[in-house]
Amino acid sequence: MFRGIPMVLVILFPLLTACQGTGEVVESLHHPVVVVDLVRLKGIGADYATCEVVFTIRNPYSSQLTVAGYDYQLTSGETPLLSGRYERHTVVAANDSAIFLS
């Protein structure tokens, strides 16, 4: 009675794992991607630091993507140096990318 069950599992297991792997690849293709192109330290003092950051956002969606600000944190190793929130509302066109300078 149970002799056929192991054979069914042997046949179905690779198919199930293949579907899971394919789902992960497809899922990763449909997320916006942010790439930091440049970080430049513009000024530093005892209680402040000014950085210039250039980054690209890629929008894989068929509709526009609204960027409503972002949080940032600059660290050295595991030591946080500065953090904050940049308030800038911008739109990235559908299936396009945009370069940002902050």
Image (cartoon, rainbow, N blue to C red):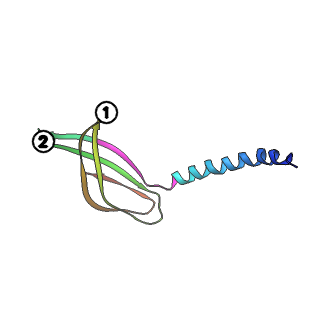
Write the start and end of the magenta stretch as one range.
29-38
Q: Where is residue 63 in the image (x, y as percent from the top left)?
A: 44, 66
Per the rendering, the mark at residue 47 is: 2
Tell me which amino acid carries mark 1.
Answer: Gly
**Residue 102 vertical placement versus 91 (above, below):** above
Left or right: 64 in relation to 26? left
Q: Position of residue 10 (x, y in %)?
A: 77, 44
For label 2, the crowd category at 10 Å Cα-Cα, with few meaning under 14, some 14 to 19 and many 20 or more, is few
**Residue 13 vertical placement versus 91 (above, below):** above
Tell which of 65 and 47 is nearer to you. 47
Q: Residue lying furthest front in this view? A: 1
Mark 1 or 2, nearer chain start = 2
Secondary structure category for the residue under label 1: loop
Q: Where is residue 12 in the image (x, y as percent from the top left)?
A: 75, 49
Per the rendering, the mark at residue 77 is: 1
Q: Residue lying furthest left in this view? A: 46
Residue found at x 47% / y 58%: 60
Q: Residue lying furthest right in this view? A: 1
Q: Do the residues labelled 1 and 2 touch (CB within 8 Å)?
A: no
What whole-number distance in Å separates the C-alpha atoms at marks 1 and 2? 20 Å
Tell which of 72 and 54 is nearer to you. 72
In magenta stretch: residue 18: no
Q: Is the magenta stretch mostly helix, strand or loop?
A: strand
Q: Position of residue 74 (x, y in %)?
A: 27, 41
Secondary structure category for the residue under label 2: loop
Q: Residue lying furthest top in this view? A: 77
For label 1, the crowd category at 10 Å Cα-Cα, with few meaning under 14, some 14 to 19 and many 20 or more, is few
Residue found at x 61% / y 47%: 21
Find residue 76 and report its image quarter: top left
Left or right: 19 in relation to 45? right
